[in-house]
Image (cartoon, rainbow, N blue to C red):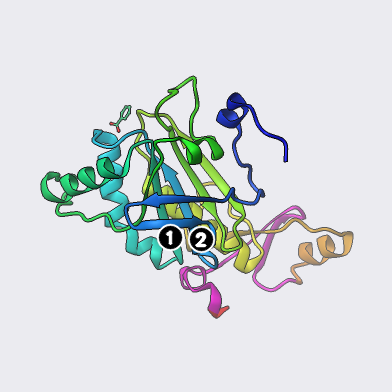
Amino acid sequence: MLEQTQEQQIISIPRIGDVAPEFKAVTTQGEINFPADYAGKWIILFSHPADFTPVCTSEFMTFANRESEFAALNCQLVGLSIDGLYSHIAWLRTIKDKIEFKGMKNIEVTFPLIEDISMKVAKKYGMIQPGESTTKAVRAVFFIDPKGIVRALIYYPLSMGRNFDELKRALIAMQTADAYGVATPADWQPGDDVIVPTAGSCGVAKDRMESKEEGVTCYDWFFCTKNLSLEQVMNPLKK
Ligand code: BEZ
């Protein structure tokens, strides 16, 4: 394989549809072999700029507080920052012992937090964006599916805390698309109507316009929706 220059490593970002880059790392929950250790699960791999910083602290408390919601969606959370293990441990202990945020307190972070002082993982995932910082990771979020494929990525600048409702919505939308072969429209929320894939032949287009497909409403041949209940969305295996 061709060696990448340091600059190429810094700017290369895994794309949607790529196999998630592999790595072994030390974390606050022991060593991990990524993504193999989580095969069969969705993974949200997210970076944050630094330990002992306020926005990151609010994010970690929120993610930890909502970890069970992601676990219920078969999703493992894995965090990363360019700090060492002992800094991570001290920061997570401080969060548990001292910090209160939006009614959350005594929050224990039990998902792995990767130590990445060498920036090895941050570079593989394009988490260093030199225009923002050459020493801190930006707030990157990678959604990786149970087969180890990158399915979505979202990047935020250092100054902006993430919206965890949106991260959960994105995960559910991708799981719904996989389970039901549909797409989700603008501002979709679980329980809203979904989009039926555009007709791929004149015959299907005609059938749809003549309302021959049960439960499907077509406004024109290319714009058809159908109801997918909240229960169906949240229990895709029972379909
Ligand atoms: C923070 O998490 O508060 C933060 C980290 C780096 C730059 C700006 C804010």
- In the figure, is residue 99 to the left or right of 71? left
- Which amino acid, mark 2? Trp
Which amino acid type corresponds to the residue marked 1 in the rendered image? Answer: Gln
Residue located 62% across and 28% down the image: 8
CB atoms at circles 2 and 1 under 8 Å apart? yes
Q: SS class of the residue under badge 2?
A: strand
Residue linked to disc 1 = 76
Kindly identify which numbered label has been placed on residue 31: none
Q: Position of residue 7 (x, y in %)?
A: 59, 24
Looking at the image, residue 174 lies above or below residue 114: below
Q: Nearer the viewer, residue 97 or 216?
A: 97
Left/right placement of residue 55 relative to residue 103 reads right
User: Where is the C terminus found, in terms of image quarters?
Assistant: bottom right
Q: Horizontal and vertical percent for residue 172?
A: 49, 59
Look at mark 2 in the image and give the residue it sits on: 42
Query: Which residue, as the protein is rendered here, is positioned at the far bottom?
Result: 238
Residue in view at x 67 percent, y 34 percent: 3
Magenta residue span: 213-237
Q: Nearer the viewer, residue 145 or 86?
A: 86
Query: In this picture, is 29 found above or below 155?
Result: below
Rendered-image quadrant of the N terminus: top right
Find residue 207 and report its horizontal and vertical position in percent. Answer: 81, 67
Which of the 4 image quarters holds residue 56?
top left
For label 1, count other residues whose C-alpha is less than 10 Å away and answer few (under 14), some (14-19) or many (20+).
some
Residue 226 colored magenta? yes
Residue reaching furthest left? 98
Q: Is residue 76 above or below residue 124?
A: below
* Residue ID at (61%, 33%): 12
174 or 38, nearer to the observer: 38
